[in-house]
Image (spheres, rainbow, N blue to C red):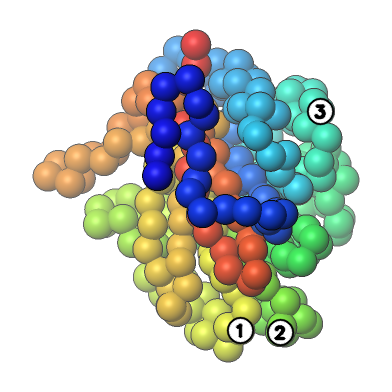
Amino acid sequence: MWRCGAERLRWPYRSGAMAKPLLLAQLSDLHIGAEWEGLDPAPRLQRVVEALLSLPNQVDAVIITGDVAADGRPADYALARELLDPLPMPVHALPGNHDDRAELRRAFRLPGEGAEPINYTAEVGSLKVVAFDSTGPGQDFAELSPGQLGWLDRALGEEPERPTLLAMHHSPLATGIEEWDGVNMPAAARAALGEVLAAHPQVRAVVGGHLHRVAASSLAGRPVLSAPSTYLQARPNFATEAVELDGEPPGFALYALLDGELSSQVESVPTR
């Protein structure tokens, strides 16, 4: 039973050593260099980093799902790296529609060259993380070319028995607002991605950002989660189909893998 008061809350019926799950944190939409709503994103990212460091269990790695900088300026990537430097675990990044691929690649020492798509895989303990570039130069919405989808199919086919998390910037889900979907991932792109996923049952979840809002759905029978922004959150009005940024606190997502099962959680971070 639960006990309150001076004693700490404890889960009942537990004894002996317990296996520790593998933990992966997801940050998204940092937008360093922005001045939206008169707010500076840097102190908010700093608070998220502090929150990560204060977790009772250290995460094994961090994945950043795009829009690290607001305008792709080298100085903003340098500031992002400075703010992330206190994190002792590996930090992996992929591009968003506001990012400059070459500058992001240089700042985070990502594979490939110049402005070509940033696709790679990372080992996080027993979990395989596939970082998949869903951006198209000069546009806000996702672009999944046949070449990109072919790369993804091959990457997922390399270790079919290993639990895998697919990370991208654009969350492959429908929001219920046509205009919002138009700048996220068009239905044809979602369908094409779903066809690839259907052939790879080891993918436990698909995670993204871009929406600046926690949202969940499924694609090809896999959970899809849109993580909150470390900067500003978005609030949709389904009657007017308007989407506005508001002063809601920053946040991040946390994924726990234990015995092949992946669970997802979302943390909100007070800004003092």
* Mark earlier in primary sequence (2, 1): 2
> Which quarter of the picture shows residue 27?
top right
Q: Helix or strand or loop: what does disc 2 sit on?
A: loop
The answer to whether mark 2 and mark 3 are in CB contact below 8 A is no
The amino acid type, in three-letter code, at marker 2 is: Pro
- Which amino acid, mark 1? His
Marks 2,1: beta carbons within 8 A: yes
Please tell me whether residue 246 is drawn above or below residue 62 in the rendered image. Answer: above
Disc 2 to disc 1, how far (Cα)?
Answer: 7 Å
| Label 2 crowd (10 A; few <14 / some 14-19 / many >=20) | some
Q: Tags 1 and 3 in contact by the CB under 8 Å rule?
A: no
The residue tagged with tag 3: helix, strand or loop?
loop
Which disc number belongs to residue 160?
2
232 or 192, nearer to the observer: 232
Q: Please, is residue 164 above or below residue 192 in the view?
A: above
Quadrant of residue 81 in the image? top right
Residue 1 vs residue 108, the one in the foreground: 1
**Could you say which is closer to the camera, residue 116 or residue 271?**
271
In the picture, the quarter occupied by the N terminus is top left
Question: Considering depth in this image, is 121 or 7 the residue closer to the camera?
Answer: 7
Q: Which label number is shown at residue 200?
A: 1
Residue 239: % across, % down = 12, 44
Residue 54 visible here: yes
Query: Could you give the CA–CA distance between mark 1 and mark 3, rounded to whole angstroms?
Result: 35 Å
From the viewer's perspective, tell me whether residue 152 is left or right of residue 245.
right
Which residue corresponds to mark 3? 85
